[in-house]
């Protein structure tokens, strides 16, 4: 199967888009500077408009998520880093579903269960781990609440105790936090890592179906 590049980016900041943004910046700056009575005021207006433009671009870029899907792996690219999962290390994947019959069964998360979580933990950078821990905190709380383990949430969300691996290696710090978090999430939802459906360019079910095709294809190619 051919490789895919997917993104939730609504429009690409190419040469044309950047030109339009620059034109808007100049027009707005010139218009606002017409109300200034001094050179210092005009310079200040241009600087403020430049900062506002930079903040808009920065905020937009922070929300952009890209995915690379190939015969061998799935990769997510975010503003704070990315992760890679090889298909040979994927046990199963699917939409997370609520345990409560009174609520909507499907949750806005796609879960991936790994055969071995250690490679994922080791390759994640501190910045990415911090983002994952914060982003998926609400999912951990929901799992604890739905399984009547809400009293364990505070201990689980901050669990950074050292992990002794089978080969004698020790995982500690942020990597230990991520390892434990994946363990707790698996107990609650059956998956180790998660993708928010808000980060997709399509419906969650459609994305899961696409991933399963590549997962099945990787098995045939090995």
Image: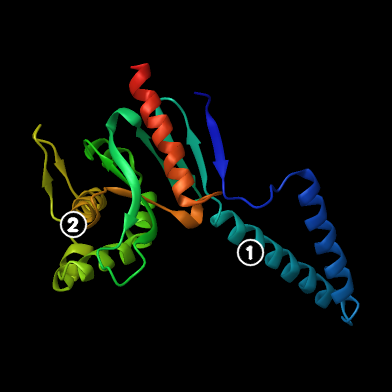
- Residue beneath the point at 55% across and 41% down: 6
Query: Depth check: 93 or 48 in front?
Result: 93
Q: How many marks?
A: 2
Residue 38, position as x, y percentages in the image: 87, 79
- Residue beneath the point at 32% across and 38% down: 123
- Residue beneath the point at 16% across and 67% down: 155
Report which residue position mark 2 lands on. Answer: 160
142 relative position to 217: left or right: left
Residue 122, position as x, y percentages in the image: 27, 39
Report which residue position mark 1 lands on. Answer: 55
- Residue beneath the point at 36% across and 67% down: 104
Residue 45, position as x, y percentages in the image: 79, 73
Q: Secondary structure under badge 2?
A: loop
Q: Is the C-beta separation of discs 1 and 2 under 8 Å?
A: no
Q: Secondary structure under badge 1?
A: helix
Q: Residues within 10 Å of mark 2 (few under 14, many from 20)?
A: some
Q: Is residue 80 visible?
A: no
Query: Depth check: 81 or 197 in front?
Result: 197
Q: Is residue 27 visible?
A: yes
Q: Residues within 10 Å of mark 1 (few under 14, many from 20)?
A: few
């Amino acid at each position: 199967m051919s490789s895919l590049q997917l993104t939730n980016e609504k429009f690409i900041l190419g040469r044309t888009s950047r030109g339009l943004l620059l034109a808007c910046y100049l027009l707005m700056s010139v218009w606002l500077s017409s109300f200034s009575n001094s050179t210092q005021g005009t310079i200040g207006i241009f600087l403020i408009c430049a900062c506002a433009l930079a903040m808009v671009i920065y905020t937009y870029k922070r929300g952009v998520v890209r995915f690379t899907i190939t015969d061998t792996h799935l990769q997510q690219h975010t503003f704070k880093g990315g992760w890679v999962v090889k298909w040979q290390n994927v046990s199963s994947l699917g939409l997370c579903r609520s345990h409560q019959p009174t609520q909507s069964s499907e949750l806005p998360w796609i879960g991936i269960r790994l055969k071995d979580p250690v490679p994922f933990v080791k390759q994640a950078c501190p910045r990415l781990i911090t983002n994952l821990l914060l982003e998926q905190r609400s999912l951990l709380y929901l799992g604890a609440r739905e399984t009547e383990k809400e009293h364990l949430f505070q201990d689980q969300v901050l669990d950074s105790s050292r992990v002794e691996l089978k080969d004698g290696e020790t995982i500690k710090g942020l990597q230990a936090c991520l390892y434990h978090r994946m363990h707790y999430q698996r107990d609650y939802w059956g998956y180790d890592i998660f993708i928010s459906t808000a980060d997709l360019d399509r419906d969650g079910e459609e994305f899961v179906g696409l991933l399963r095709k590549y997962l099945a294809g990787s098995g045939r190619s090995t």
